[in-house]
Image: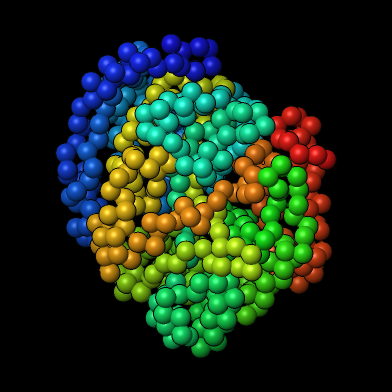
Amino acid sequence: MADRVGRFVITRRRFIQGTAATILLAGCGGSDDGNGGGSEAGAAGAPAETFSEPSQRLSGELKILLWSHFVPRHDKWFDRFAADWGEKVGVKVTVDHIEVTTIPARLEAEISARSGHDLAQFIGPLPQLEPSVIDLADVTKEATRRFGAQIDICRRSSLNPTTNKYYAYSPSWVPDPGNYRKSMWTAVGLPNGPTTWEELREGGKEIKASKKVPVGIGMSQEIDSNMAGRALLWSYGGAIQDENENVILDSPETVAAVEYMSGLFKDAMTNEVFAWNPASNNQALVAGKLSYIINSISAYRTMQQVNPRVAEDVFFVPALKGPKDDVAAQHVMYNWLVPEHAKNPDAAQEFLLHYTENFARATWESELYDFPAFKKLSPDLPKWLDDDPFGSKPADKLSVLKDALEWTTNVGHRGSANTAIGEVFGTFLIPNMYARAARGRATAQQAVARAEGQIKPIFDKWRKRGLIGGTA
């Protein structure tokens, strides 16, 4: 039974009825477009879709907003998948895909107008929107009951531990490995790619000098720069906040990380990294113009289609080791939000459960880009990574991602992705910090002090509103 904000309770009787009513929607064939990483790769073997009756009677319209996926076949599948579900439950489903960088502003505008989409997806945490979205604790708990424990990085990217509110639902995430050109790194004595930040600098410097091909780690106002900058920060032992949500950025460890980035830029990179958008490092790697980037497998999947020769030369490494740790942020953290103004929150939450139930198919249609937050939902993922159904050469090229959870953490490390962390993330203060020092506009210590001076008021603001803990 739903209440006025769209919470619902799924009774044991209704769940059993829903389970009994489960039917197969698709057999072992691929998606309608069958457009995989190779010309025929992925055309067969896709997991079957299932349908379980929702726990309540649904009607009306469900408006969904989500990003235009980096793997195009996913969106073709998702649109059909959502529409099919709507037809079965009596809901008219419309899906709008927009460019990823425009989603936060679009959501803020809809929240301000108290009108727009019922359900929205973003590829990073948006905890700063917590006051304007409904609590998705019920859908998260029901998913956990059905599908097992949610992995920690997804829980920490959707639950505010101070308010105990699930400001988002996170059914999936994407690893953020290093992507490197094997032939280039073999020439500098590292055929398996760099394993440490220092090897990245030394090898990258030699490759740039000999091949005129730079390393590509962004320092601009875009999501990849945010992720890479945090990985470096944590690997040097720094962090934005401690486990109690106190700001601890200004430390010798952070200064050392900024000094390293300045050196890496001088030795192995070019000025383009200061003006990148989320697609820039992908495009440059696809064009064969970079020796190493930190990114998901999306650039590689594109390469398989448009530049297969370079694709065969691209391999992957886990998080680089620093003086203190070897850890990376997730590349993508799927946050699904239901704004308070949503006209059909019940359908939004029921759809999320249906989508989660079929996440093995979502993983497949994303060409192994999207990983599940509930491990039992994609039992074949390790097998796929060992023997890529989308045409990798060698077939086990993606096997390095099988243990990605061991070297991945959330953007709020050492705590959770709270409202303050969300605002810091959204205003790109960390990549700006690196860029100021790398461009010679400040010393590393000055850049760090400036960034902390910008971050502390953000934490103070949200702490005064009772949305984070810690002390002023």
* Residue 84, x across and y down, in percent: 27, 29
* Residue 131, x across and y down, in percent: 65, 27
Which residue is rendered at x = 17% and y = 43% of the image? 28
Left or right: residue 36 versus residue 164 is: left
Left or right: residue 364 versus residue 270 is: left
Please state which of residues 62 and 29 is positioned toward the viewer in this rendering.
29
Left or right: residue 169 versus residue 11 is: right
* Residue 119, x across and y down, in percent: 47, 29
Left or right: residue 205 versus residue 392 is: right
Q: Is residue 141 visible?
A: yes
Above or below for 172 versus 274: above
* Residue 456, x across and y down, in percent: 79, 46
Above or below for 32 versus 232: above
Quarter occupied by residue 431: bottom right
Quadrant holding the N terminus: top left
What kind of colouring is applied to the model shown? rainbow
Quarter occupied by residue 88: top left
Which residue is rendered at x = 66% and y = 52% of the image? 428
Question: Hey, which residue is sitting farthest bottom in the picture?
Answer: 210
Quadrant holding the C terminus: top right
Which residue is rendered at x = 36% and y = 74% of the image? 313
Which residue is rendered at x = 47% and y = 29% of the image? 140
Q: Is residue 73 visible?
A: no
Quarter occupied by residue 13: top left
Please state which of residues 85 and 197 is positioned toward the viewer in this rendering.
197
Above or below for 329 versus 106: below
How many dots with numbers? Answer: 0
